Structure formats: structure tokens, C-alpha cells
Amino acid sequence: MWPRANGAYVYLPGGTNGSADAPSDFYNEVQIKLKTIGLEPPTWTYKYNGGANPIGFAIPYDKATHSVFREILTTAYEQA
């Protein structure tokens, strides 16, 4: 996690699939979950850093305890 003035920014592995034209299924899942709590869609970079395809998003302090972040982090850990 990278500290920000109003929270933190996190980068997670993007999952096992995806292409230059379409993000991974995990990205789509994260995007939907963040939208449900009113946050911006995550970023996704194909083949960045040796093919890690990272998903990046902000975690604001006022929403940091929301269960959606635990769900996202658990899924990312299980895929690793």
C-alpha cells in the first residue's frame, strides 16, 4: 500500500487471464465491487512488470473498513 493524503493506494496482481484489449476477469470483479461502494474504477496495465498485470485503486480512509476490500484482498491472495 502506498500512503495518500486521504488513504492509501494499492496494487494487486491482475489475475491469470486478460489481453492487451481486455482486462482479466479479476479486474472486472474488482471494478464491480468498487462501483457498488461508490469508488472509481481501478487501473489495469497489461504486461507491466514482468507480466504481473497489476490492478491499482485507492482506498479512502472513510471506506477502509468496508468488507469489500477484505473480499478483494482475499481473492487476490488466493489467486497468487
Image: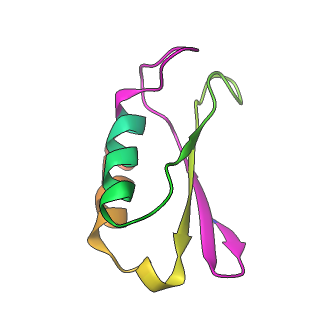
Q: Residue at x 72, y 81 (%)?
A: 5
Task: Classify residue 47 by image quadrant.
Answer: top right
Kindly identify the residue that appears in the image at 53 percent across and 76 percent down: 60
* Horizontal side of residue 43 vs 62, given as left or right: right
- Position in image of residue 4 (x %, y %): 70, 74
Vertically, is 18 above or below 78? above
The answer to whether 19 is drawn above or below residue 60 in the figure is above
The magenta-colored residue range is 2-25
Q: Is residue 26 above or below residue 5?
A: above
Q: Is residue 80 visible?
A: no
Residue 12 is covered by the magenta coloring: yes
The residue under the point 42% across, 37% down is 27
Task: Give the residue drawn at x 32%, y 41%.
Answer: 29
**Which quadrant of the rendered structure holds the N terminus?**
bottom right
| Image side of residue 68 versus residue 2, left or right | left
Residue 72 location, x and y as percent?
Answer: 35, 54
In which quadrant of the rendered view does residue 2 lie? bottom right
- Asked if residue 77 shows in the view, the reply is yes
The residue lying furthest to the bottom in this view is: 62
> Percent from the top left, x then y, of residue 43?
59, 43
Percent position of residue 21, x then y? 54, 14
Image quadrant holding the C terminus, namely top left
